[in-house]
Each structure stands twice: as C-alpha cells, then as structure tokens.
Amino acid sequence: MKKVLFDLIALQDVDMKVRGLKTRLGMIPKERKKFEQALDDAESAIKDKRNKLKAIELNINKTESEIAKFDDSVRKLQSNSALVKKNNEYQAMLLEIEHNKEKISNLETELLEMMDQADAMKKSLSTEECQGAARIKSIKDELDELVTLEREIKEQGRALLAKSKEFTAHVRPELLERYQHLLKGEGQPLVKLKGEICGNCNFKITPQTRNNCLSGNIVNCDNCSHMLYHDPNSSE
Ligand SMILES: [Zn+2]
C-alpha cells in the first residue's frame, strides 16, 4: 500500500473513532434526563404517601379534639341538669345531650376508619420507602456511571483529536482538503472500491475511474464524490 493511502487511512480511523465518540456523547443528555425523571418519580412517590399520611393524622387529631369538645359539653349539660326546674327546659336539655352523644358516636366511627386508613398508609409508606430506597440507589448509581462515561469519552476524544491533528500533517494538502470536506458529511470520506462499485454509495463507477483506481490512485466516485481506493489484498 502506498504511504499516502496508508496515512490517509490512519487519519480516517482516528476521525471515525472521534465521530463515534461524539455520537455517544450526544446521547448522554437524553439518558441523564431519563434517569433524573426516574429519580424524581421515585422520590415523589414516597413524598406523596408521607403527605397523605400526614393529612390523615391531622384529621385524626381534629376529630379527637371535636369528640373531646362534645364530651365536655355533655358533661357540663349533665352536671347542670339538677339546676333545671322547668320540664320543657329539662326535655330540651336531654335532647341536646342525646344529640351530642349521637355526634360523638358518628365521630368515633369516622375516627376508627381514619385510624385504619393511617395504618394501611403507614404500611404502604414503609414498603414504598424500602423499595424506593433501592430504586433511588440504583438510579443514582446509573447517573454516576453516566458521569464517568462522559468524562472518559471526553478524555478519549481529546487524545484522539490530538492524534488526528498529528496525522493530518502527514497528508498532502489537496488530499486533506477533499478528505476534510467529505468528513463533514455522512459516511466515510475514503472507501474501498468493491469491484466496480463504490463502497459508500454502492453505485457503479465508470471504467475510466475504475482503471485509474486500480492503478493505485485515490479517485473520486462519479456519483457521491467520496474518495475511492483499491485494496489489492481484498477479495472484493
Ligand atoms: Zn459513491
């Protein structure tokens, strides 16, 4: 293989690695966002249950103090009953006591339901906290790995870019210009000729271009203008 071709292939190998790293690097923000969202979801599932439990407990406290208030009122009415002389007032008072007792009974039923709810919520919260902690840890580990990966890719990228710059110096300016122009587009700038077919666009090249290529020159594909070379060791 001619040195000019050898140098260009070496440069392209490095540049293709850089391109691959850039593609990988470009995927990282989306992946990070996905993990951050998952972390947010796991944390808010726990927070949500804690808030619900807190709300139930607040209601329990409120109901307990309401019951205490009615209890107090019943006690006062009962202790005042001896002082009431008129029968109609006495009846009214009994009715009020009855009324308050009914309210207490209703509130106590509600209280029991709320206590059941609180117990269920505590269990659910404890399960969520346990599972959530494992989930959160695993997501955080994945995020850490992603940060490491990003750093490694950048380091590798910097080393490869330095190598690319170094290899660039070995390539003839007019070849380099063509190569760098093609590098900005898609596919590999320099590809093997496969029989009569361009390795980039898979179109058949003209016999003249093919002959030129077979004599060891780097030629341009008639269709996609990518650089073509002939590899005498290749079976293609
Ligand atoms: Zn082509």
Image (cartoon, rainbow, N blue to C red):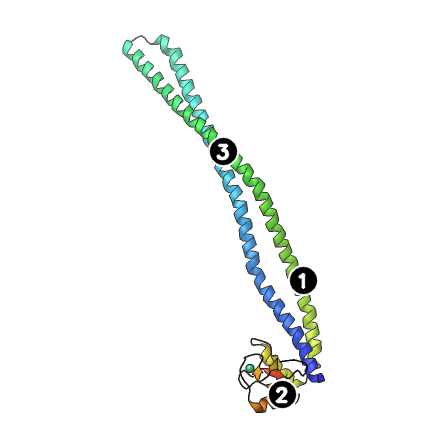
Compare marks 1 and 3 and give the one earlier in the sequence. Answer: 3
The residue at which mark 3 appears reads as 120
Looking at this view, is 29 or 15 the one in front?
A: 15
The residue type indicated by label 1 comes to: Glu
The residue type indicated by label 2 comes to: Cys
Q: Nearer the viewer, mark 1 or mark 2?
A: 2
Label 1: how many Cα within 10 Å (few below 14, some 14–19, many 20+) = few
**Do the residues bearing badges 1 and 2 touch, measured as CB atoms within 8 Å?**
no
Q: Which quadrant: the N terminus?
A: bottom right
Compare marks 3 and 2 and give the one earlier in the sequence. Answer: 3
Question: Mark 2 falls on what kind of element?
Answer: helix
Residue 162, placed above or below residue 213: above
Q: Is residue 183 left or right of residue 6?
A: left
Quadrant of residue 100 in the image?
Answer: top left
The residue type indicated by label 3 comes to: Ala
Labelled disc at residue 170: none
Q: Is residue 112 left or right of residue 34?
A: left
Residue 74, placed above or below residue 233: above
Label 2: how many Cα within 10 Å (few below 14, some 14–19, many 20+) = many
Which residue is rendered at x = 56% and y = 83% of the image? Answer: 197
